[in-house]
Image: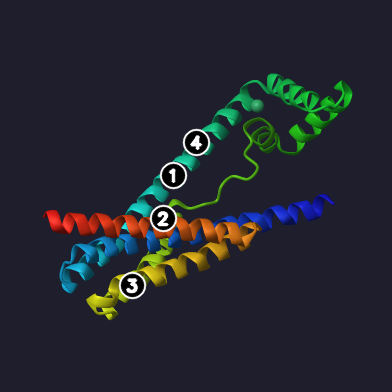
Amino acid sequence: MSQSWHKEKHFSNRNNWLRAGVLGANDGLISTASLLMGMAAADPNHHTLLLSGIAAMISGAASMAAGEYVSVSSQRDTEAADLRKEMDSLTKYPEVELEELTAIYRQRGLDENLAQQVAQAMTKHNALEAHAREEIGITEVSKANPLQAAFASALAFSCGAIMPVLLSFLTSSIWLMMVLAITTILGLAILGCISAHLGGAPKSPAVIRIVILGAFALALTSIMGHILGIIF
Ligand SMILES: [Zn+2]
């Protein structure tokens, strides 16, 4: 039983990566498409529209990458600092640390003898690992590489952003807003479906949610673009 639980957990970890990718694509699609809708509604020429689409894609991808890099790095630094502190304490005060671990097991419902036995066995096997898990809650030292994570999220964002950019390249201005709206909603529905599937959640609520939010974002930027286009 414990083995199947273990497998399940790893499966869900891998899904988390995929879901992060889908969410990144979602971001790229919705933000670039809304920007293009706003620009198209303000009625700039096709050339300006294309340039803004490409600029939105690049700046969005760069910002996703920077955010991810910072977040993964600081997560790693925090973990490393925690582990260093724990290692230090284990070397200096092994008795205190053993008592600490025993107390944790006692709190989880083991009786005094058993708690002591488990704490001693764990300490003997791998003291740092036991303290990291039971005390700090680090089950697995995160192996995420900040650069890799940054690249992955920039790529995910670009995958979502490239569709509206390509469409505005290929579609004439008259049809662009309609084509953008339809394909974006469709794209969001597909991404919502994939995301729900990966998370093991029901698909319809996820799809309805993202479609409504996406339509709202597109409508809002088109209206704003239209108004601003008149004012300026
Ligand atoms: Zn400790």
Q: Which residue is labeled 1 in the image? A: 71
Mark 4 is on which residue type?
Thr
Q: Which residue is labeled 3 in the image? A: 178
Q: How many marks?
A: 4
Mark 3 is on which residue type?
Met
SS for dot 1: helix
| N-terminal label among 4 and 1 | 1
Q: CA distance from mark 4 to mark 3?
A: 48 Å
Q: CA distance from mark 4 to mark 2?
A: 18 Å
Residue occupying the point 24% across, 76% down:
174
* 95 left or right of 185 in image: right
Q: Quadrant of the C terminus?
A: bottom left
Which circle marks residue 150 in the picture? 2
Q: Position of residue 101 (x, y in %)?
A: 73, 26
Which of the two marks, 4 or 1, is nearer to us in this view? 1
Q: CA distance from mark 4 to mark 1?
A: 11 Å
* 20 left or right of 168 in image: right
Mark 2 is on which residue type?
Ala
SS for dot 4: helix
